[in-house]
Image (spheres, rainbow, N blue to C red):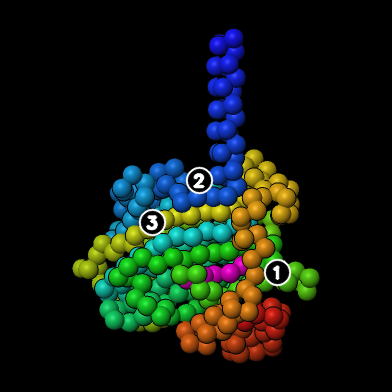
């Protein structure tokens, strides 16, 4: 009898562990870099520290470095705290993005373009769908991103992509497939981050070059958090659809849109801090702007 009770208790415990692991895969949690990412280039320039809670990427005059997530995701919210390269970071490019593979890949980009000391970082954003990019918007920041950590987030669901800085939306790209605008809806993407030399174009159009005597240049990462649908062997942890029945009900990202307050913040950022918008570049589009530029808040 006691043997039976013990076996039954062990089975219940095992079931509880499995359920907890499954719910974690749905709901997400603050990650551990040792578990969640691979350091895929740069050798010792990429380092995981503090038991997996802290990561650094460095660039020197030989090469940069980078990491990528071990999981692939199809919709979700990705948050990362980043402290960018301080001082004279001219010519450096620190990237944080989601991407699939192949010539017709999907991609959602944050790129941080370094500058000379005292000048603002430029935040370069872009979105690719079915291999088509060219949807650049650039912003300066309302704080110094090199003195402390700030949170950079991507919300990606079937309706919208939102780029956020410290939970303030700086850009949106809505799903306008109904009018023929490609939108990333079917290709799972991994999370990537790299640091590399882009001195030919990154700082003031390439006029300011990298000062290698100041290297190595290092960006730091912590509090990587993923609330997303994990895709493995063609199956999603959220099931075959994005219905509220198929994912933990606490995940607001699955239906997140801007709302009045979010739209107000977005308009403030775009009015005060936007430096370039492809949707207003007449020289680039003399025959008319892309379709998404004339609809809703994609501008």
Which residue in the structure is indicated by mark 2? 70
Asked whether residue 40 is in view, the answer is no
Residue 75 on image: x %, y %: 63, 57
Above or below, 50 against 152 in this view is: above
Asked whether residue 168 is in view, the answer is yes
- The image's mark for residue 222 is 3
Q: Secondary structure at mark 2?
A: loop
Foreground pick, 156 / 2: 2
Q: Secondary structure at mark 1?
A: loop
Residue 97, magenta (yes or no)? no
Above or below, 26 against 218 in this view is: above
Residue 8 on image: x %, y %: 60, 19
User: Which circle's residue, 1 or 2, is located before the other in the chain?
Assistant: 2
Q: Residue at x 69, y 87 (%)?
A: 288
Which residue in the structure is indicated by mark 1? 175
Q: Nearer the viewer, mark 1 or mark 3?
A: 3
């Amino acid at each position: 009898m006691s043997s039976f009770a013990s076996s039954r208790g062990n089975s219940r415990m095992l079931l509880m562990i499995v359920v907890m692991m499954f719910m974690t895969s749905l709901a997400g949690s603050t990650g551990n870099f040792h578990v969640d990412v691979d350091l895929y280039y740069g050798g010792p320039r990429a380092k995981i520290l503090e038991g997996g809670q802290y990561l650094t990427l460095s660039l020197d005059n030989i090469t940069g470095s980078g990491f990528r997530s071990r999981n692939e995701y199809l919709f979700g919210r990705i948050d990362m705290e980043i402290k960018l390269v301080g001082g004279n970071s001219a010519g450096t490019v620190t990237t944080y993005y989601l991407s699939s593979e192949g010539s017709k890949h999907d991609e959602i980009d944050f790129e941080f373009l370094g500058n000379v000391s005292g000048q603002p970082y430029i935040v370069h954003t872009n979105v690719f769908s079915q291999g088509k990019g060219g949807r650049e918007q650039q912003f300066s920041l309302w704080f110094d991103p090199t003195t402390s950590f700030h949170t950079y987030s991507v919300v990606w669901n079937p309706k919208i992509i939102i780029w956020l800085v410290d939970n303030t939306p700086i850009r949106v790209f809505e799903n306008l497939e109904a009018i023929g605008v490609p939108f990333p809806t079917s290709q799972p993407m991994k999370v990537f981050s790299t640091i590399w030399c882009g001195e030919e174009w990154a700082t003031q159009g390439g006029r300011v070059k990298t000062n290698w005597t100041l290297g190595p240049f290092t960006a730091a990462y912590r509090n990587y958090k993923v609330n997303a649908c994990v895709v493995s062997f063609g199956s999603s942890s959220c099931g075959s659809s994005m219905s509220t029945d198929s994912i933990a009900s606490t995940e607001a990202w699955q239906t997140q849109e801007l709302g009045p307050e979010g739209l107000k913040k977005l308009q403030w950022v775009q009015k005060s801090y936007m430096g370039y918008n492809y949707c207003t570049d007449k020289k680039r589009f003399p025959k008319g702007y892309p379709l998404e530029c004339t609809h809703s808040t994609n501008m």
